[in-house]
Amino acid sequence: MTQQNPPTIFRDVRPMGGDPVDLVVVDGVVAESAPVGGAEVVDCGGRIALPTLVDAHIHPDKTSWGEPWQSRRPAKGIAELGEQDAAFFRNCPSPVADRAERLMGHAVTRGTRAMRAHADIAPAYGLDGLHGVREAARRLEHALDVRVVAFPQHGVRRAPGTDALLEEALRTGVADLVGGIDPEGFDDDLDGQLDLVFGLADRYRVGVDIHLHDSGSVGSRTIWAIIERTRALDMGGNVAVSHAFGVTPAAGDFEAVAAGLGEAGVALTTVAPDPSRVLPVARLREHGVRVGVGSDGVRDSWSPFGDADMLHRAHLLARALRARLDEQLSDAFLTAAHDGAALVDLPRADFAVGAPADFLLVDGECLPQVVVDLPPRHAVVRAGRVVAREGRLL
């Protein structure tokens, strides 16, 4: 959202690592020149300005960020991990809103401008986690755009009553999108879950974002079922599949699936877990498929790792894609910045006149070097206003 802030001149700044300029911002967007009269001046000291990034897939309701260390127990699959999520939810003294705000605020200080936040809904929680993430988003709305997904982590058929909770989340407006999870491989109800999710999305005019960890024939069947429903309901541009581990060049039907996704307007998101499961961003882009990048879980029951730092995630994406050339390193960053923005319906922060003045400042030589070296964020700017400096929210 564009904010009405005083005109600001960011002096001696290097957009995208180019030559130093004085960047003028008026009413939260890049302008050709400052209006007559006073303007605030921010000395950038020759630092590089880069677009702030979009976390297209994160679970802030699950996090233990800022809590005492949580030891994890063995788990054999999604169901047992979900049970540990529920146990942590019951036993953690800090409410979801506080934990989520800590994590989401930290993400802002590292250069995140927006996120798609998945919040679990299930009979074990009701809508408490969803309301907590929504409250955290409200507290940070000056610095961060948040789209909240009602996510049935425990399944729909496997957790009776979840269907009613999904509808309540959409009817009351607390969720912006409706989610799903492995309709066949986990929930054992491919058509039932997808008919419910897409039916709710159509009724309440919201987007869809489905976790799909399944690969092989199950994953392929599910992808095609999602494509068919997206086409039938004319929902192109409003449907995403998260993880999509089965969409790899090694899959026999990769070209057909990629073409189908692109034609239907179904986006994908990756968390760049490793070279074997990362999405082939460049090849998917050739078919018109948008690919966002996300953090996934951060210090939760599933994993002790994660930091909600999307520059770090762009670094991981580049490594997983075995980037070596400058353009490959830069593309990993721009995927997280510009492709992520498109996925959550935000304009590009590309420093063009009229573009949102959302950027981060770092010391460095050029964008590829920044992706590799991960320098500290000197400052983060939102709509022309400095919202974080030296790792601290202002």
Image (tube, rainbow, N blue to C red):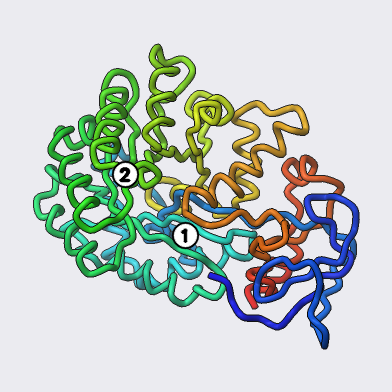
Residue at horizontal 27%, vertical 58%?
87
Image x and y of residue 313, in percent = 59, 45
Residue at horizontal 30%, vertical 55%?
206
Image x and y of residue 62, in percent = 37, 57
Instruction: Give, as a three-letter code, the residue at label 1.
Output: Trp
In the image, 302: left or right of 277? left
* Mark 2 and mark 1: Cα distance apart in space: 42 Å
Residues packed near mark 1 inside 10 Å, few (<14), some (14 to 19) or many (20 plus): few
Residue at horizontal 61%, vertical 38%?
316
Q: Nearer the viewer, residue 40 or 46?
A: 40
Q: Is residue 205 above or below residue 291?
A: below
N-terminal-most mark, 2 or 1: 1
Q: Please name the residue that numbered disc 2 is placed on.
A: 235
- The answer to the question of whether label 2 and label 1 lie on touching residues, with beta carbons closer than 8 A, is no
In the image, 297: left or right of 307? left
Which residue is the extreme one toward the top? 252
Residue at horizontal 13%, vertical 38%?
192
Q: Quadrant of residue 59?
A: bottom left
Q: Quadrant of residue 245?
A: top left
Q: Which of the two marks, 2 or 1, is nearer to us in this view?
A: 2
Q: Please name the residue that numbered disc 1 is placed on.
A: 69
Instruction: Give, as a three-letter code, the residue at label 2.
Output: Met
Image x and y of residue 122, in percent = 20, 56
Name the image quarter holding the C terminus: bottom right
Residues packed near mark 2 inside 10 Å, few (<14), some (14 to 19) or many (20 plus): many
Q: Quadrant of residue 157?
A: top left
Q: Nearer the viewer, residue 168 or 70?
A: 168
Image x and y of residue 57, in percent = 45, 49
Per the image, label 2 sits on a secondary structure element best described as: loop
Q: Is residue 283 above or below residue 47?
A: above
